Amino acid sequence: MNEEQKNKYYDKYLQAKQKGVKFWPDIIYKDLIVSFALFLLVIGLAAFVGVAQEPKADPFDSNYVPRPEWYFLFLFEFLKFIPGQLEWVGTTLIPGIGILILLFLPFLDRNPYRHWKKRKIGLMVMGLIVLGIVGLTVRSVVTTPEVEEVALAGSIAEQVIQGQDLYSIYCVECHQPDGEGGEVVGVEGLEGVILKPINSQDEMWTRTDETLFNVIDYGQQDLGMPPNGLGYGGELPRNEIEKIVTFMRYTWDERAEIPEEAIVGIPALTEGEAPSYEVHISMVVKRYCISCHRPGKENNEYLMGSYQEMLTTGNNADKNIIAGDLQNSYLILTLYRESILDPATGEEMIGPMPPSKDLKAEYVEMFERWILEGMPETADEAAALSSPAVEEVAPESTVTEVTPEP
Amino acid sequence: MAGKVFAWFDERLGLEAFYSTVLDRKIPKVNWWFTLGSASLFLCVIQALTGVFLTMYYVPSPAVAYDSIQYITKGVAFGWLVRGIHHWSATLLVITLFLHMLRTFFYGAYKFPREMTWMTGVLLFLLTLGMGLTGYLLPWNQRSYWATTVATEIFGTVPFLGDFLFKVLRGGTDLSALTLARFFSAHIWILPAGVVLLLGVHMVLIVKLGISNIPGEDE
């Protein structure tokens, strides 16, 4: 810009200033309105949208899809278009040049005019860059897979409940549903090993949470316990191990007081009530069966993870559960601790279940009634099958209110 | 009495002069887009205030960082709100800064005599992105851990300097307690120091040069 242009600019600016307004209060008034509106917006977002909960960092869980802060997404997306050996072009050269151009823009742009009509090329270039950034951001949001829902335990109670579910899957096959241990039956490589109880006072008073965590994470491989942590080849991320530890501590250590809402029992059946998969059977299965009857275990391919799986999987799918037939349903026979023999060879095909000890009589009865009623899935289906409950047969003596039929 | 007190301070601080040079000055008539700068400053102040409160409970160590944030959101009175404000205000700040820059560009306000205002502004924007990058790691959750893993790897691809930058950022080859400590330090000391410095220059220049006018067709 030469001196003449500079002076011309000063003249114009002076004119604009004279026709203008006072900084205080005119400009500040507008600023305050916008700032106040933003303040309300921020409070609203903080109060009603909040901050997404995420599980704790787990250096071993490399399956996690990295997601940068949203305003860096366009850079990530941009890098996808750059071939590997030219990575530095995308990460250094282009962003570097971009930043330098932006920084030194006043010196690179020699056009003395300010009004948009006389700077059309510059504005078009900037417009395209902005569109590109917005477009790449949108593309990135659309193509990145949704964050997998992870069960996050906020309270101790939630930790205990989720921890018990995990314990039931990963630990019960050897340590038994209540940590009582005993002889391991039906687990590859550990057949016949006798496990000490892990729910005892000795155990709880002498092992800190950290020790319990490490035992689950690394295992005790000389004693036969395999590692469970992702970092050592197991299946559990760190936050899940922490939940199991919390479950053990609050359930078996009498010094810890378990929150009431963390005690989830299996609902008992009332007289004449038909059990459903949803309310009753799935709860029993979750505690006593799923540890072995899940993929990757020795279980004759019989999986019990869902209603469908229970009815349709396994090498003997047609005989496992036969509606109304307690004499021939393998599920019930094994719960009666009978061995199922292969009709062709006469060898034992399926042993008594659960392998190492009897299922409580009330749960066996629950399975019996469920099969007799034809395996209702939902609570509603079961309710329809239930014989009228006792209290509905009201004694004549009570005052009955007359309610008009709708 | 009040007049005497004012006179005492005015004699020593020059309040009248401040009033006449900073507040009681003529400014070109501008539109609402010109509020984006002060809006960004406002959000910046919110970030500083909420950030200070967060450091009272936050512990920058991998063992407890996550739990300390759990405690802030669940245990501390209004901790959830302060953290929520810090989170959302950061997001809005990036947006207002970006729009502020586009407004400046559209009106050609980066031209003479405001070249230095523009340059400090660009640097402030980069520092803000740096605040976002370092702040993202602090909650020490899955999202922050893996995003930072990738981000530091990207710095590692810079020709010649890559390996050095990578190790400086991480404090070694792994993303570790050292990484968290230096990101925290950068987030609350180094980058804010730069922001304060540049923001000071930016503001002085704005007052000295006056905010730009909306250019007429012949300008």
Image: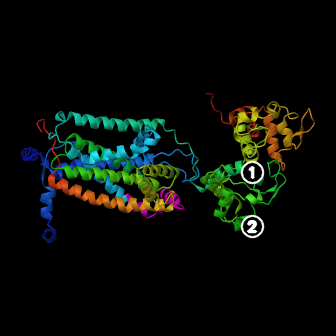
Quadrant for the C terminus of chain B, please.
Answer: top left
Point 57% across, 48% down: residue: A62
Point 75% across, 34% down: residue: A313
Residue B104: quadrant of the picture: top left
Colouring scheme applied when the structure was drawn: rainbow
Point 80% across, 39% down: residue: A367
Horizontal and vertical percent for residue B154?
44, 49
Q: Chain of mark 1?
A: A
Horizontal and vertical percent for residue A365?
82, 42
Horizontal and vertical percent for residue B22?
16, 57
Compare residues B92 and A130 and report the one nearer the observer: A130
Q: Amino acid at mark 1?
A: Val
| Mark seen at residue A202 | 2
Give the secondary structure at mark 1.
helix
Q: Over which residues does the magenta segment extend?
A: B50-76
Q: Could one spot residue A389 in this view of the protein?
A: yes
- Is B22 in the magenta? no
Horizontal and vertical percent for residue B178?
48, 62
* Dot 2 crowding, Cα within 10 Å, few <14, some 14–19, many 20+: few
User: Is the residue B32 above or below the residue A258 in the image?
Assistant: above
A48 horizontally vs B92: left or right: right
Quadrant for the N terminus of chain B, please.
Answer: bottom left
Q: Chain of mark 2?
A: A
| Mark seen at residue A172 | 1
Give the secondary structure at mark 2.
helix
- Spatial distance from mark 1 to mark 2, Cα to Cα? 20 Å
Q: Amino acid at mark 2?
A: Asp
* Dot 1 crowding, Cα within 10 Å, few <14, some 14–19, many 20+: many
